[in-house]
Image (tube, helix red, strand yellow):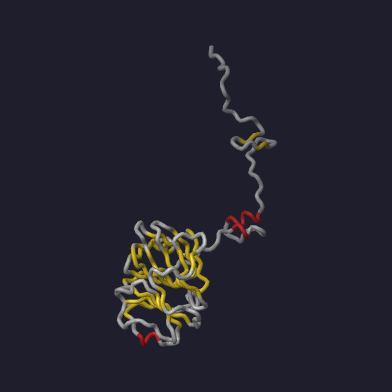
Amino acid sequence: MPTRPTGGRSNRTPQGTARGTGLSTAAGRFYTPRVPNRLFRWLRGARPPAGDGERLAPAASVAPGVTVHAASTAAELGAGAARGGVSCLGPFDPSAARDGHAWAGVVLAGGSAGEVFFAAGGTLDLPAGVAVLLDGARTAEEGAPGRIGRETLAGSVVPGVTGARLLHRSSARSVLRLGPPPAARWAVEGLRSVAVLAGKLTLVDGEEARDVRAGEVAFVAEPAATLHVQAGNDAALAIGFGRPELSVRLG
């Protein structure tokens, strides 16, 4: 005669309880909680319920748009509304620097490499043919020095930001020096161009990292975008030109 098991667990679901839900019903039928119609419409692609707009993910930010050029080549990026100035790379042509822009330039080769020059009286005191990165602004520049030497401690340090120094700031532009120390990281907004004089910088353009080595120049198409910059493991040194409101922080 079969014996009745004792102490075992029953697989039967008590009447009035929907298995796995813990929700009771009068007849034991499965019960689905009621969801407001407006929420269903939202989940199917309609506009979110009123008051929930602040929880939407922000739109994707604009990438800086970085292009890298060898110092021995010629390149130019125009002055759109976002850039506020034109960037030119190549052998210096004195006649080209008399087009109404307020010009500044950093020498890229030779004994004057790393020195920054400003137009005094509308002209740049540079020898013809020298490789130079130029920054031209439509806004007149007053009070700029004629020249800033490579090792000159001009301008001022950026408080709390290791390895960043503003060599000059005016209504036309900012001149920024980055590095050393090695492996420093910065977040820069307002940068139009940068020339690497020693070592290497890595510029993060959206999701792509672009290396800029000594003897190379980078143009930035969208200066308003945040550009993350990292110095290489060597003593990187770079000079950049940017908008007057350029800002830099540790990044």
Give the x, y percent position of residue 159: 52, 62
Residue nearer the viewer, 183 or 203:
183
Question: Relative to 102, does residue 108 appear above or below in the rendering?
Answer: above
Give the x, y percent position of residue 171: 52, 78
Residue nearer the viewer, 56 or 1:
56
Residue 64 visible in the displayed image? yes
Residue nearer the viewer, 167 or 192:
167
Outermost residue toward the front in this view = 152
Question: Relative to 65, does residue 34 appear above or below in the rendering?
Answer: above
Question: Relative to 221, does residue 235 appear above or below in the rendering?
Answer: above
In percent of the image, x 33 and y 74: which residue is there?
112
Outermost residue toward the right in this view = 26
**Quadrant of residue 118 within the rendered picture:** bottom left
**Number of numbered discs on residues:** 0
In percent of the image, x 47 and y 78: which residue is there?
144
Give the x, y percent position of residue 210: 37, 63
Residue nearer the viewer, 51 or 188:
188
In the image, taking residue 24 as reference, residue 166 lies left or right, namely: left
In the image, taking residue 217 as reference, residue 161 lies left or right, namely: right
In the image, taking residue 11 as reference, residue 131 lies left or right, namely: left
Residue 67 visible in the displayed image? no
Outermost residue toward the top in this view = 1
Give the x, y percent position of residue 153: 44, 68
